Every structure is written in structure tokens, then in C-alpha cells.
Image (spheres, rainbow, N blue to C red):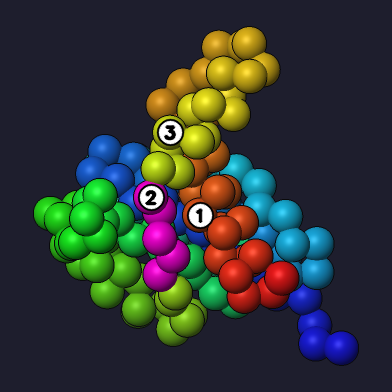
Amino acid sequence: MPANKTLLGLDVGTTRTGVALADTGVRIAVPYDTIDMEDGPVEAVGEIIVREKVATIVVGYPRNQAGLATTQTTHVEEFARKLEAFDVPIEFQDESLTSVMAEDRLKVHGRPYSKEDIDAGAAAIILQDYIEANYG
């Protein structure tokens, strides 16, 4: 049986990036943190990669309702290219409506939440979708 691996999920934004983690043995993605995009985001991701011994990075891939690339798609692709420096495999996963789903999940609890909570939750949904498609 192969060893468990740590997966890192990213919901890359222009202001913040949501971060989630999962272990391939447990197969449940959990929100981890958010990264401010003005404070060295590539370095922050690198610190998480080292600290958590990340084996694969899963990046949410945005498209419009017609499935076409947008300006945000270009932003995400450029950010992912910078992450190649860490020599960790990078996979893209569709992120359609993940922020809406994350906010809906938070509303159910009836407690206050922040945009950071939404972003980290969206990263967890992206990562969970990847896990289900690849480790199901």
C-alpha cells in the first residue's frame, strides 16, 4: 500500500489565497489558512510546503460560465508558474462556484464568518473535488 501523501489546495485570488490541506489516507480536505497576496505569497506557500511536507499542490482553475479562460485564469496560471520553483507537482482542479458553496456551508452554522473563512473553505472544496476524482 502506498504511503499517505499531504496535498495542498489553493484558491488563488487577487487579494487573498485560500489554503486547505488533506492527507491521501484520510481523504478529507480541511481549510487551513489564507495568504495575503501582498505579503510574499509565493514564499508563504513555500513555507507551508516545507512545514507540512506537501507532495502535490492542487490549484483551483477558474473559468467563466461558458468554460472559457478569464483574466483570473491568467492570474492563477502565472501564480502557479512561480510555485514550480518548489519542485512539487502542480495539478489544476475546476473551481466553479466553490466560493459560493463555501459561503453557503458557513451560513448553515449561523455564526459570523469572514472572507478569509470563505477563501479557505473554497480551497477545501477544490481539494476535496480533486481527491474524489483522483483517490476515490
Q: Residue at x 80, y 83 (%)?
A: 3
Q: Disc 2, disc 3: CB below 8 Å?
A: no
Give x and y (percent) for residue 59: 41, 63
Give x and y (percent) for residue 104: 53, 26
What quarter of the picture does the C terminus occupy?
Answer: bottom right
Q: Majority secondary structure of the magenta segment?
A: strand
Magenta stretch, residue numbers: 92-96
C-alpha gap between disc 2 and disc 3: 9 Å
Residue 50: in sight, yes or no? no
Q: Amino acid at mark 3?
A: Val
C-alpha gap between disc 1 and disc 3: 12 Å
For disc 1, the neighbor class at 10 Å (few under 14, some 14 to 19, many from 20) is many
Q: Which residue is mark 1?
A: 126
Give x and y (percent) for residue 94: 40, 60
Q: Secondary structure at mark 1?
A: helix
Q: Residue at x 57, y 18 (%)?
A: 107
Q: Compared with residue 110, is residue 81 higher up or lower down, i.e. above or below? A: below
Q: Secondary structure at mark 3?
A: helix
Badge nearest the viewer, 2 or 1 = 2
What quarter of the picture does the N terminus occupy?
Answer: bottom right
Which of marks 1 and 2 precedes in the sequence? 2
Q: Which residue is mark 2?
A: 96
Which of marks 3 and 1 precedes in the sequence? 3
